[in-house]
Image: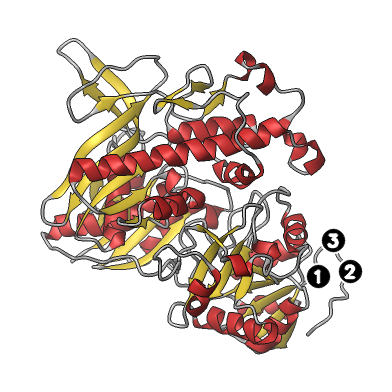
Amino acid sequence: MSNILVINPGHNGSAAFWQHDKLKFYIEEERLSRYKYDGNPYRGMVEALQYGVDILVITGTSEELPRLAWTGEDPYTAFLRKFNPKLKTINIGADHHFAHACSAFVNSGFSKAAAVIIDGAGSRRGIKVSDEVTNYGFETETIFDCCWDDGFTRKYTVYGGNPDTFLAASDSIYMDSSVTLVKAYEAVSEYLGFTFIEAGKTMGLAPYGQKDDSIPNLFVDGKANRNMLIPNYPAGAHIDYNRIEKLRLKEDPKAWHTDPSKVTEEAMNLAWSVQQETQELAGDLIEKAVDMTGKKNIVIAGGYGLNCVANYYYKKRFPDLNIYVDPVSHDGGTTIGTGIYFWNKEYESKLKRPLTTLYLGPERKENYDLLENYDTKDVTPADVAKLISEKNIVTIFQGRSEAGPRALGNRSILYDPTDPQGKDVVNKVKGREWFRPFAGSMLKEYFEEWFETYGMEESPFMMYAMDFKSDKHGECPAITHVDGTCRIQTVTREQNEAYYDLIEEFRKITGVPILFNTSFNLAGEPLVETLEDALHTMENCDIKYMYLPEVGKLVMVASEQTEEDSQTP
């Protein structure tokens, strides 16, 4: 038996380490380096070295990794080989969508499924059209037929690129529109003053808009409107706003990010359009997957899988399908399930290990000696719940960090969801844009009482922006978006005992079984990973309280912006 390290060297760089047949840890490089979207996961590799690495599996987006002088090795193999001369390397860098499908399928627990991958730009692949012609494009949308017994069969792929025209390569692989779903989202995000990778902000603005007949559709008959969208593969795309008078920028689009009075109807309506049009086309792709594979189990991954509005739309549109959205759908997540896949391939086994938790960060002994420089107080969950109910922001830090972009109660900022001013209060503290919504964490047993669940029994990974029940409208204004939805996480005591107990104590005080929950970071920064990161973050913002359930303490931190006169509960 061997230790397998799976790495994704691209943006959202990550490392997943399998000790024999068990996932020892998963970590994104940005959490360790403190550099947003960091690639090249060397620090994650160092984490694995304490256990030893026998097999290195490399996922990624490029067909060829850079080669080092003298040995000709890729830099990751060279680094680990110096610690284990017998290291075996498996490179699947030219099959990025396959890596997404591996993780989504393995994590789902299904025995058979169709995998729908919707990505910005996966691997660049050459598709031979004839003896004289080979087209090159980047994977953008792919359907796989997945089965534990029969393996993975690529049934359909859309390839994107910068040339205007692609030719059909075969009956099963297509060269199609050169601007696809994620690229359209990237183009609109750039137009709105965000980076192309900040599509989540565009999703947050979308409910403020509406259908605008004066703005042309981004897609016509399922194909990108090339009068609207200009591709820029592999990174990003652009709105061709000079062709459309109404969309011509009259000032810096970033001006309204902090001032809602400056936001334009065009900005809001374009955000609405890209959300509406892409989620409908993604739904059409799911229908195609069912038709091509005959499967009723659907697994979804790729960057678009993090679109929690679209994920809820699928649940409503396809009540008869079993849909699983990989909770770490972005590129970093390709390392999790891929480890299981290659374990089975290496040892000719049929090990099935569905994903049951996202508390997967490295296990470490935190340096609680750091607390000697701060005021602390012994507290119970009831004490902390009372503090939150009195409209105090409280962070919580415990256990292993969460995989993926969602904070699930181990690295979270908490607040009272019933405060009508709560969204503005916390957005200001975090330095976020005014229109961005917040999530909630709730006791699972109250899930169906509060939300329109469409057959879902739980939402442990916070992958859906769900409608509140009609009789609950207005109960939690701080976490209710303008469209009446909330991205919600359900919690059981078995999943996270300390977090469950805190929410339960808040329920006893307020009658509301939900806490306002957002990630423990400031705008533009990665989530905190270590206690030192947490303390540093609090010293640079107006948050005074941090709850440490594992030692039963409340830490009072006076930031550089506030007076050191915090009140203890």
Q: Quadrant of the N terminus?
A: bottom left
529 and 303: which one is in front?
A: 303
| Residue under the image location 45 percent in, 59 percent down | 27
Q: Position of residue 304 (x, y in %)?
A: 44, 44
Mark 1 falls on what kind of element? loop
Disc 1 + disc 2, Cβ < 8 Å? yes
Location of residue 417 with respect to 38 vertically, above or below: below
Q: Nearer the viewer, residue 320 or 2?
A: 320
**What is the distance, in whole Å, between disc 3 and disc 1 at their CAs?**
8 Å
Q: Element at badge 2?
A: loop
Residue 563 disc label? 2
Q: Residues within 10 Å of mark 3 (few under 14, many from 20)?
A: few
At x 31%, y 52%, the residue is 299
Whether the residues at callouts 3 and 1 have beta carbons within 8 Å, the answer is no
- Pinpoint residue 239: horizontal percent, then vertical percent: 57, 24
Number of the label disc, if any, that sits on residue 491: none
Residue 569 pos. (x, y %): 78, 85
Name the residue at 75% across, 68% down: 419
For this orientation, the residue located farthest to the top is: 132
Q: Residue at x 76, y 59 (%)?
A: 429
Amino acid under disc 3: Gln
For label 3, the residue is: 561
The amino acid type of the residue labelled 2 equals: Glu
Q: Which residue is mark 1?
A: 558
Q: Quadrant of residue 161?
A: top left
Of the numbered discs 1 and 2, the one sitting upstream in the chain is 1
Q: In the image, 271: left or right of 150? A: right
Question: Which SS class for mark 3?
Answer: loop
> Which residue is nearer to you in this view: 284 or 380?
284
Label 2 crowd bin: few (<14), some (14–19), many (20+), radius 10 Å: few
Q: Mark 1, residues whose alpha carbon is within 10 Å: few (<14), some, or many (≥20)?
A: many
